[in-house]
Image (cartoon, helix red, strand yellow):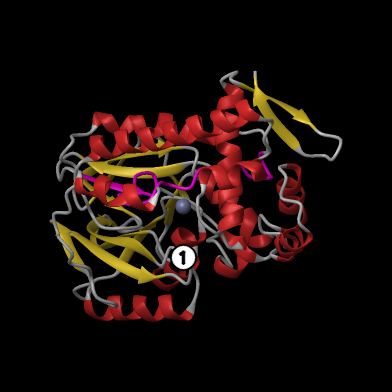
Amino acid sequence: MPHRAALNLLEQQLDYPLGDRLPATGQTLEVAPGIKWIRMALPFALDHINLWLLRDEIDSPDGSGVRLQGWTVVDCCISRDEARAQWEQIFANELDGLPILRVIVTHMHPDHIGLAHWLCARWKAPLWISATDYNAARIGSQSTTGFGGEGAALFFASHGLTDAESVEKIRGRSSYYPSMVPDVPRSFRRMQDGDTVSIGGRNWSCISGYGHAPEHISLSCAGLNVLIAGDMMLPRISTNVSVYDVEPESNPLKAFLDSIDKFRALPQDTLVLPSHGKPFTGLHTRIDQLHDHHRDRLAEVMEACAAAPQSGADILPVMFKRVLDLHQTTFAMGEAVAHLHLLWFAGKLQRRLGADGVWRFRVA
Ligand SMILES: [Zn+2]
């Protein structure tokens, strides 16, 4: 979440080859040969997601050796009527009468995997995803807590979010994940770092990314000079990097920064297809911007901790200079703890558990 004033200056250092053009609802925009951009609305502060249709051909799964023509979908949107209706328009008008052959999901967050079960069932298409994210999505969609509830409330409280109203709301938000991901296909095809996937006769490389989701997979195609970045490389906002209750001693910010450095192996003029915002070029510039952004936030956190021991909740007004609603507060808390943890793992901060059950971080 970059500061507003700095936003436009940073964006000016990137190029948007399509200008301000956006695909209309239920339509697509071709961004590279055989790659169509779909944009769907989301009912959140982050109000849209980009999905991709890739012209494809695969061997028929019946073993006949026949080559099937069709499309591979990358990412799906959350499960809701508006998204299904928009998909129906796409099926009717944008597939050249061909089927969906395969559903690729970059990671397990609801806006990416929510409708995978529906798309896979409707087209009898396989799901391709990392094993880690498949299993996390399966657990999240089938559990009554769905990554929220009591565990999350206790975790946030241990980092200083203790006001009764917030704690009660977090506790009550227990079926948040399954409400957007009601089901996940019963089987999947694994994607791992370094795998090559042939799509439409072109080779795409899988690039794992950590710190945002358990095992996010981006896909790059040297032949097209295109990177389907998912959420690992966004032009306008910084990717959410959070510590969660299921892995309370993680260091996701270190993992994220290490992961985005892997993209430096791709050319600066790579056309980056992000899950939010517009397709852009200036990959290395954006990697540098994200490092700078987090370096600045880390410096602010260090400064605050030098003045007095700080909990995650204490850090919120240091890192986020605006009013946050509860949804934003939970994201921001995860991010604040992620910054504290990077400094803690680096030996720059120590933490102590107070008599009130709250972790506070001080300069080592
Ligand atoms: Zn995500």
Rendering coords of residue 287 (x, y %): 31, 36
The answer, for residue 210, to whether it is visible in the render is yes
Q: Position of residue 238 (x, y in %)?
A: 40, 46
Q: Closest to the observer: 138 or 280?
A: 280
Q: Residue at x 58, y 20 (%)?
A: 348
* Residue 262: in magenta span: no
Residue at point 63% right, 56% down?
A: 140
Residue 251, visible in the rendered structure: no
Image quarter hosting the C terminus: top right
Q: Nearer the viewer, residue 278 or 55?
A: 278
Residue drawn 40% across the image and 49% down it: 3
Q: Which residue is mark 1?
A: 45
Q: Residue sitting at 77 percent across and 55 percent down?
A: 150
- Circle 1 sits in a helix, a strand or a loop, which is it? loop
- The image quarter in which residue 224 lies: top left
Q: Nearer the viewer, residue 288 or 108?
A: 288
Residue reaching furthest to the front = 307
Residue lying at the far right in this picture: please name it. 355
Quadrant of residue 292 within the rendered picture: top left
| Cβ at disc 1 under 8 Å from ligand 1 | no
Q: Toward the viewer: 293 or 54?
A: 293
Dot 1 crowding, Cα within 10 Å, few <14, some 14–19, many 20+: few
Horizontal relation, residue 226 to residue 248: left or right: left
Residue 155 in the figure: left or right of residue 200: right
Residue 202: x and y, percent?
19, 46
Query: In the rendering, at what x and y percent does residue 221 appear?
Result: 22, 42
Residue 167 placement, left or right of 264: right
Disc 1 residue type (three-letter): Ala
Tell me where the magenta segment starts and ends, as one range.
226-247
